[in-house]
C-alpha cells in the first residue's frame, strides 16, 4: 500500500529530526538493509563454492574409478 503525500512528508520530517537528534542511530539504521544484503550475498557465495567443491570431488572420484 502506497503512502499518501502527507504520510511521506511526515516520515521525511521524522527522518530529519532523527538525523539531528541522534546521527549515530540514523547512520546505523540507514546501513541495516545493506548489512542484510551483504550477509545474503556471502551466504549465496558460500553455497556456490560448496556446490562447486562437491561437484569437483564427485568428478575426481568418477575419473579415478574409471582409470
Image: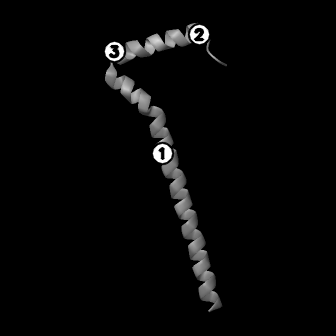
Disc number for residue 39 = 1
- Look at the numbered disc 2 and give the secondary structure of its residue: helix
Above or below residue 49? Residue 6 is above
Q: Residues within 10 Å of mark 3 (few under 14, many from 20)?
A: few
Q: Residue at x 51, y 51 (%)?
A: 43
Q: Which numbered disc, 3 or 2, marks the residue that appears first in the sequence?
A: 2
Q: Residue at x 52, y 55 (%)?
A: 45
The image shows residue 35 at horizontal and vertical percentages of: 45, 39
Q: What is the secondary structure assignment of the residue under circle 3? A: helix
| Residue 66 pos. (x, y %) | 65, 89
Mark 2 lies on residue? 5
- Who comes first in sequence, dot 1 or dot 2? 2
Quadrant where the C terminus sits is bottom right
Mark 1 lies on a secondary structure that is: helix
Residue that appears at 49% across and 39% down: 36
Nearer to us in this view, 35 or 8 = 8
Question: Can you identify the residue that label 3 sits on?
Answer: 20
Q: CA distance from mark 3 to mark 1?
A: 29 Å
Which residue is at 36% across, 24% downward?
A: 25
Q: Nearer the viewer, mark 1 or mark 2?
A: 2
43 w.r.t. 37: above or below: below
Q: Nearer the viewer, mark 3 or mark 1?
A: 3
Amino acid at each position: 500500500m502506497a503512502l499518501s503525500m502527507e504520510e511521506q512528508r511526515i516520515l521525511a520530517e521524522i527522518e530529519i529530526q532523527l538525523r539531528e537528534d541522534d546521527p549515530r542511530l540514523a547512520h546505523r539504521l540507514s546501513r541495516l538493509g545493506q548489512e542484510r544484503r551483504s550477509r545474503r550475498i556471502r551466504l549465496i557465495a558460500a553455497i556456490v563454492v560448496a556446490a562447486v567443491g562437491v561437484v569437483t570431488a564427485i568428478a575426481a572420484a568418477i575419473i579415478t574409478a574409471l582409470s
